[in-house]
Image (tube, helix red, strand yellow):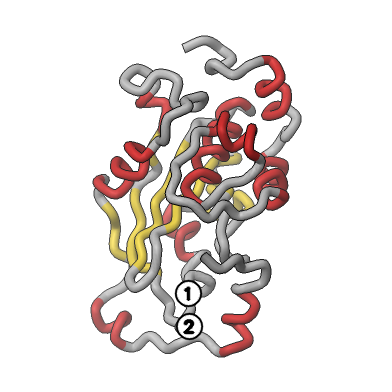
């Protein structure tokens, strides 16, 4: 794969201009949340200026790659809720994350977490459904999308949907976060916490 990963000079400049992980997050935050059954490539997200969770994470992974990071994705698995995919990166051995979410607390994480599990647990209190239930239960290992450069050449610039990425993430082993007893004893969040999570929420 060429050094520009198939992006046009204009696309490459746009991604390079994001400069840092927080720059990537700010670009995602500026995009309207995309309500659709699609799995756009980073090129299509750049062109449309909108994204949902999966598309935002894949966009983040590609943008991180352009900035010199590995293009890593992490799947968060939930019950009575939708899964969440985040782009993850490491700075001096510590993990951070970039994400697009309809819930305000499920987005950026500074690279201050010593392990992937510690990073994932930072999402636990904010990972709630509309009934106020805490729904996060498991997480995958980080998946490096560079492994697909040969089998799915051009995934960063594809005009076709990338559902195969979601399918791969769903199929990799996931680590449980809670014991059965912990799950039984979970309480619902209070109304104020739920309202905070719904700031900027866009109904389907």
Q: Position of residue 186 (x, y in %)?
A: 38, 85
Q: Are marks 1 and 2 in contact (CB under 8 Å)?
A: yes
Foreground pick, 94 / 155: 155
Residue 37 is left or right of residue 171, and the answer is right
Q: CA distance from mark 1 to mark 2?
A: 6 Å
Q: Is there any visible trace of residue 152 in the rendered image?
A: yes
Q: Position of residue 122 (x, y in %)?
A: 52, 65
Residue sitting at 40 percent across and 18 percent down? 153
Compared with residue 16, is residue 54 higher up or lower down, i.e. above or below?
Answer: below
Q: Is there any visible trace of residue 97 in the rendered image?
A: no
Q: Position of residue 53 (x, y in %)?
A: 51, 52
Residue 167 in which image quadrant: top left
Residue 87 is left or right of residue 21, and the answer is left
Q: Which residue in the structure is indicated by mark 2?
A: 132
Q: Which mark is residue 128?
A: 1
Residue sitting at 33 percent across and 70 percent down? 79
């Amino acid at each position: 794969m060429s050094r520009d990963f198939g992006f046009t000079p204009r696309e490459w400049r746009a991604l390079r201009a994001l400069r840092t992980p927080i720059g990537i997050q700010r670009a995602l935050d500026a995009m309207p949340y995309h309500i659709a059954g699609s799995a756009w490539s980073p090129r299509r997200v750049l062109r449309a200026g909108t994204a949902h969770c999966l598309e935002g994470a894949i966009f983040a992974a590609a943008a991180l790659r352009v900035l010199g990071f590995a293009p890593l994705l992490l799947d968060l698995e939930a019950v009575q809720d939708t899964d969440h995919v985040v782009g993850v990166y490491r700075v001096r051995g510590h993990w951070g994350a970039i994400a697009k979410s309809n819930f305000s607390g499920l987005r950026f994480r500074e690279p201050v977490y010593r392990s992937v599990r510690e990073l994932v647990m930072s999402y636990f209190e904010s990972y709630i459904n509309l009934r106020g239930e805490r729904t996060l239960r498991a997480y995958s290992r980080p998946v490096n999308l560079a492994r697909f450069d040969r089998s799915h050449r051009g995934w960063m610039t594809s005009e076709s949907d990338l559902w195969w990425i979601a399918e791969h993430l769903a199929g990799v082993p996931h680590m449980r976060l809670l014991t059965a007893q912990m799950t039984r004893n979970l309480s619902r969040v209070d109304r104020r916490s739920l309202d905070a999570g719904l700031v900027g929420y866009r109904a389907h």
